[in-house]
C-alpha cells in the first residue's frame, strides 16, 4: 500500500526558506512521478513542482527560480527546497505520487506552510 508522509512545513517570514520532505513507501521505483501541489484557502489545488523517475523536472511559473525539487537516489523521498518565500506561497502543501503503469495517484496528508509579511 502506498503511503506518503510529509514533513517540514511551518511559519516563516517573507524572504525566508523552508525545506519540505516526503517519504514514500510501497511505491514502484520507476515509471512514476512525484511532486508537490499546494492549496491556499478559497483556491483550487495547484501544481508546484514535479520530478519523474527519469529525473525530469517541471515547475509552476510562480515558483521558478525560488523552489527546487529533488529526489534521493532510492527515489523514495522527494524534497522541495523553498527559498525567497512570499506571503502568496502560504498554503497547505501536498506530496503527490503517480504510478504510470497502474494509472493511480496518491496524496499525502498535507503540511502547512505560512509565510508572514
Image: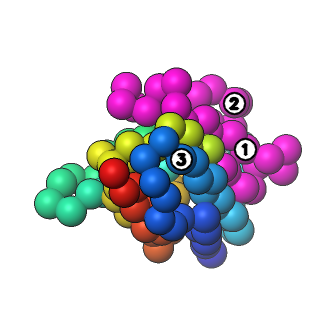
Q: Position of residue 2 (x, y in %)?
A: 61, 69
Front residue of 91/24: it is 91
Q: Please give the name of the residue rendered at 52% of the width and 32% of the height, measured from the top-left corner.
A: 66
Front residue of 46/98: it is 46
Q: Which residue is mark 2?
A: 55
Front residue of 102/55: it is 55
Q: Residue furthest left?
A: 42
Q: Is residue 111 above or below residue 71?
A: below
Q: Position of residue 77 (x, y in %)?
A: 72, 55
Label located before the other in sequence (2 or 3)? 3
- Helix or strand or loop: what does disc 1 sit on? strand
Q: Please give the name of the residue rendered at 49% of the width and 58% of the height, measured from the top-left corner.
A: 12
Q: Nearer the viewer, mark 2 or mark 3?
A: 3
Crowding around mark 1 (Cα neighbors within 10 Å: few <14, some 14 to 19, many 20+) is some
Tell me the number on the disc at residue 42.
Answer: none
Horizontally, is 16 left or right of 40 in the view?
right
Q: Position of residue 64 (x, y in %)?
A: 47, 26
Q: Which residue is mark 3?
A: 16
Find the distance from the CA under tag 3 to the CA under tag 1.
22 Å
Q: Please give the name of the residue rendered at 61% of the width and 68% of the height, measured from the top-left corner.
A: 7
- Helix or strand or loop: what does disc 3 sit on? loop
Q: Please give the name of the residue rendered at 69% of the width and 40% of the height, measured from the top-left corner.
A: 70
Horizontally, is 114 left or right of 76 in the view?
left
- Residue 4 among those drawn in magenta: no
Q: Which residue is mark 1?
A: 71
Please state the extent of the stretch shown in magenta in the rendering.
51-79
Horizontally, is 104 left or right of 20 in the view?
left
Q: Position of residue 87 (x, y in %)?
A: 33, 49
Amino acid at each position: 500500500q502506498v503511503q506518503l508522509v510529509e514533513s517540514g512545513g511551518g511559519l516563516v517570514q517573507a524572504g525566508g526558506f523552508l525545506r519540505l520532505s516526503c517519504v514514500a513507501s510501497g511505491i514502484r521505483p520507476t515509471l512514476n512521478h512525484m511532486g508537490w501541489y499546494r492549496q491556499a484557502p478559497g483556491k483550487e489545488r495547484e501544481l508546484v513542482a514535479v520530478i519523474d523517475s527519469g529525473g525530469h523536472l517541471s515547475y509552476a511559473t510562480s515558483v521558478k527560480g525560488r523552489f527546487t525539487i529533488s529526489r534521493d537516489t532510492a527515489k523514495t523521498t522527494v524534497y522541495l527546497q523553498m527559498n525567497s518565500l512570499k506571503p502568496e506561497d502560504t498554503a497547505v502543501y501536498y506530496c503527490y505520487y503517480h504510478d504510470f503503469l497502474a494509472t493511480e495517484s496518491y496524496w499525502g496528508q498535507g503540511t502547512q506552510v505560512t509565510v508572514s509579511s
